[in-house]
Image (spheres, rainbow, N blue to C red):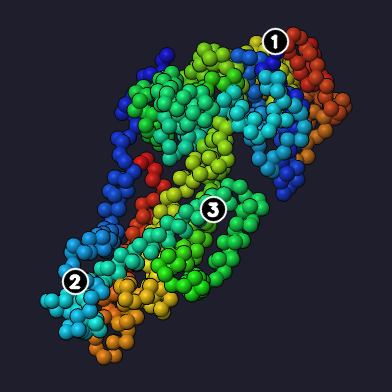
Amino acid sequence: MSTLAYASADEAPARRSAAALLWRRLSRNVMSLAALGVLAVVALSALAAPVLLPYDPDAPDAERTLEPPGRRHWLGTDLYGRDQLTRIVYAGRVDLLVAIEATAIALSLGAVLGAVSGYRGGWIDQVLMRIVDTIQAFPSFILAMGIAAALGNSVTNIVIAIAITHVPIYGRLIRGEMLRIRETEYAEAARTVGNRQRRIIFYHLLPNCFPPVVVQATLAMGFAILTVAALSYIGLGIRPPTSEWGAMTAEGASYIVSGEWWIFAFPGMAIMATVLSFNLLGDALRDVLDPRMKGV
Amino acid sequence: MTDLLAVQGLTVHFATDEGVVQAVDGASLQIGAGEVVGLVGESGSGKSVTALAILRLLRPPARVLGGRIEFDGRDLLGCSEEEMRAVRGAQISMVFQSPRTSLNPVLPVGHQIERLLVQHGAVPPREARERAVEMLREVGIGEPERRARQYAHHLSGGMCQRVMIAMALATNPRLLIADEPTTGLDVSIAAQILDLLGDLGRRTGAAILFITHDLGVVARRCDRVVVMHAGQTVEWAPVRALFHAPAHPYTQALLRSIPRVVGTGEMEPIPGWVPSPLAPPPGCRFARRCPLARTECEAPVPVRAVGGEHRVACVAAEAS
């Protein structure tokens, strides 16, 4: 056949993995690098907390209560003489874990819901989207409060509460993507070769919805952390003595007037830095992914 | 010859906000085993809708209102969805017009062929990879092992179409529907793709239904031609008969409208417009543009033989 000639090796661009390309584009932006740095520090220190830190986050030290930041306790101690830095790092474990779990659950549910809704349309779409509307009709924090209050405030229940409030975010997004993708030619091609509908939806089409979902999930992670912290701040979330950023801020709040600022300020800054980093990273990812990763 | 595929009186309507679009109205065509048939017509004449109807892939608002589609002696319109899935991709395959966007962007191309093979039980799962690579080699892709691991965006348009063809023929289908398979490819690549299709069709014994608006494609590569106009099939002929003695005034006009590089023949556009599919005229839909139109054209037009296998739906056409 006369056909072999043009199918030569140099025709395709050099192979580069999508992850490498993503990294290359992200690393051009100083803000996203800083955000990644902060998140890496929070995550790694949370993982390695027992090795990194000499103190027990929950052990009181009656001789060193309310100590200001100094050489011995870098970020000071609280009312019970517990090391603030240690508690903040351990709190990162709780906050990150809750946010990751909630996001994972919400994403899975939202993906199934949105994909089926978008692909099938018709009454299934109507029913599923009205359910989503109902969830969204509540202010999400009030809903999370309600669920947490009704279920009781264990870590699992906080995860459930946040997951439920986040399902609509993913459900709607993926439905919208699916509406577009189901009309593409590769969707038609998938139907043409006799695939089952379930397989078309979840294997062939759903992965194509992911670029905007990655962006959304990153932004929603920050929002989830803020929600855990807020729930804990008002006493509906994680309870003391477990260290948690929101709960720690709440404990510190009563010391603002008496001058012990470090008790609320540092956990508050941890919340701010983490949430801000997720938001910055999400924005950077949007810039990278949104004009579609053409020519990857 | 017994027909592999026989479409009889196919009628497809689309319910839209503006009214009912009569996209296909009583279309008929036959394809024998191993035969290459061209389905020719302007854009919007219902060619692709007919193809999708054959695979029963039309979705609302499209509705098949009538007709029979017999494939290998079986009525496809009466098949269950389960039965249709076994037909699609295994016995009837399809190649689309935009190869780049017909491949799933998130799956390696070789993997897509493998999946198809496994799904239809064409080969045992462990041999699927090998067979996929073999198919890629068969359609003239160099370094098939490496290409199999790549994604659609790594490949050129022509290569993507080769992959689509490999996929379409991997399961040894009895019928391949090629819906304008060379749109968007440059002329030399298009010719290679058409050669490849014809070549592989002959080798595997698959019948091919070429859907195209390019009469040149038809002339060189088809055994028989079916001409479609505004949702109706108007002429059926062996390829030589069609070009030497076109019987339907529309076909004649179509042939006159081809620009010619040599000779003095002027290119003649067809006067008027394709009638609106929302309110098509009764009877022959070409009547209002037809130089030979007469009152009988207002009534449903009978199909007449004008010699051998040459048939035409026109009251004015003369036997050759």
Left or right of residue B42, residue B198 in this image: left
The residue that appears at 45% across and 27% down in the rendered structure is: B125
The disc labelled 1 sits on which kind of residue? Met
* Total residue callouts: 3
Please tell me which residue lies in front, A45 or B60.
Answer: A45
Q: Residues within 10 Å of mark 2 (few under 14, many from 20)?
A: some
The disc placed on residue B1 is 1
Task: Name the image quarter holding the N terminus of chain B.
Answer: top right
Q: Secondary structure at mark 1?
A: loop
- The correct choice, above or below, for A96 with respect to B126 in the image is below
Image depth: mark 1 or mark 3 in front: 3
The residue that appears at 29% across and 49% down in the rendered structure is: A23
Please tell me which residue lies in front, B185 or A136.
Answer: A136
Task: Name the image quarter holding the C terminus of chain B.
Answer: top right
The residue that appears at 59% across and 58% down in the rendered structure is: A129
Q: Secondary structure at mark 3?
A: helix
Q: Residues within 10 Å of mark 1 (few under 14, many from 20)?
A: few
Give the image location of residue A70, x and y in percent: 14, 79
Q: Quadrant of residue A91?
A: bottom left
Please tell me which residue lies in front, A231 or B305.
Answer: A231
Q: Do the residues at discs 2 and 1 belong to one chain?
A: no
* Residue topped by disc 3: A114
Q: Chain of mark 3?
A: A
Left or right of residue B78, residue A101 in this image: left
